[in-house]
Image: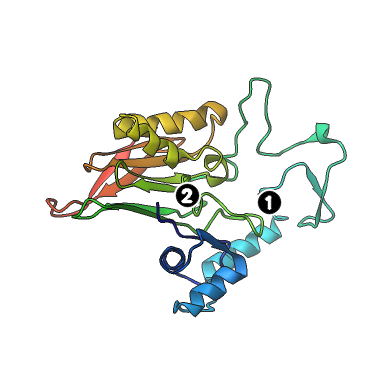
Amino acid sequence: MEVGAVASMRYVKDGIKAARLVMQHTKHTMLVGERASIFAISMGLPGPTNLSSSESMDKWTRWKENNCQPNFRKNVVPVDSCGPFQPKDNLGHNKGICSEANSIGTIESRTCLVGPHSHDTISMAVIDKMGHVAVGTSTNGATFKISGRVGDGPIAGSAAYADDGVGACGATGDGDIMMRFLPCYQVVESMRQGMEPELAAKDAISRIARKFPDFMGAVVAINKDGVHAGACHGWTFQYSVRSPDMDDVKVFTVLP
């Protein structure tokens, strides 16, 4: 149950290293924002560093030229095309938003914002030769996110969770939706109750899909014995595995 996390951290490239420093050298669980960057740099990580690339700047420029569309706001009207934004007085006239509850309790599509190419999460679970289990997740966040947004990556139990006595889970996808369900905590707890990794992974994904039938996401589960499986919704998902008795990494494909 050792956990370290950073969120909304700028100017430091190695986010996962900063999270490990929080775990190893503080009694906190999470640091955020500018102070997280200051902590990471003070502990020896390179920075401050400009993390923008020509590709990301070009993408941002095209987005601005397209009136800052798409974006993650809802129930608002802009003073001009890119804000500032104000709440709508009449919420009955929501047109073009990506998320709205309907009469049967499910949520309509967000796929205009979230897809396989709009985020870059990496999650990795490891079992060492002593049987200790660890997992880490790192992400750059969602493309065109609102400044200050924190996704599921640093939330323990959402994009990652591990327990030596059970196993581990990593997740990727629409983090704003997935973090509401803590899918990796659910996976590990299901395995604790006796579920095999495949069933535990499918169960966690199905819980989200019942409320958000158009969401995109995936989880990978591995138990303490090294048995692994993945489950996904809204896309075809791949994950890779390497064990001491394998000559190379093997890629597994999971269908929705």
Q: Residue furthest front?
A: 27
The amino acid marked with disc number 2 is Ala
Picture coordinates of residue 134, whole percent (x, y):
33, 53
Q: Is 126 drawn above or below residue 95 in the view shown?
A: below
Query: Quadrant of the image for the C terminus?
Result: top left
Residue 60, position in %: x, y?
Answer: 62, 63
Q: Quadrant of residue 201?
A: top left
Determine the residue positioned at 52% across, 71% down.
53
Residue 17 vs 97, above or below: the answer is below
**Residue for badge 2:** 156
State how the image is colored.
rainbow
Tell which of 87 and 187 is nearer to you: 187
Mark 1: few, some, or many residues within 10 Å (few <14, many ≥20)? Answer: some
Disc 2 secondary structure class: loop
Q: Position of residue 115 (x, y in %)?
A: 51, 45
Q: Horizontal placement of 136 versus 26: left or right?
A: left
Residue at 40 percent across and 51 percent down: it is 1
The residue singled out by tag 1 in the image is: 69
Mark 1 lies on a secondary structure that is loop
Q: Position of residue 14 (x, y in %)?
A: 44, 69
Tally the marks.
2
Left or right of 95? Residue 253 is left
Give the label, 1 or 2, closer to the camera: 2
Tell me the amino acid under the disc marked 1: Gln
Seen from the viewer's position, the closer of residues 171 and 34 is: 34
Q: Nearer the viewer, residue 109 or 188?
A: 188
Vertical side of 1 occupied by 230: above or below: above
Which mark sits nearer the N-terminus, 1 or 2? 1
Label 2 crowding class (10 Å Cα cut-off): few <14, some 14-19, many 20+?
many
From this viewpoint, is residue 255 visible? Answer: no
Cα–Cα gap, marks 1 and 2: 31 Å
Q: Residue at x 64, y 20 (%)?
A: 104
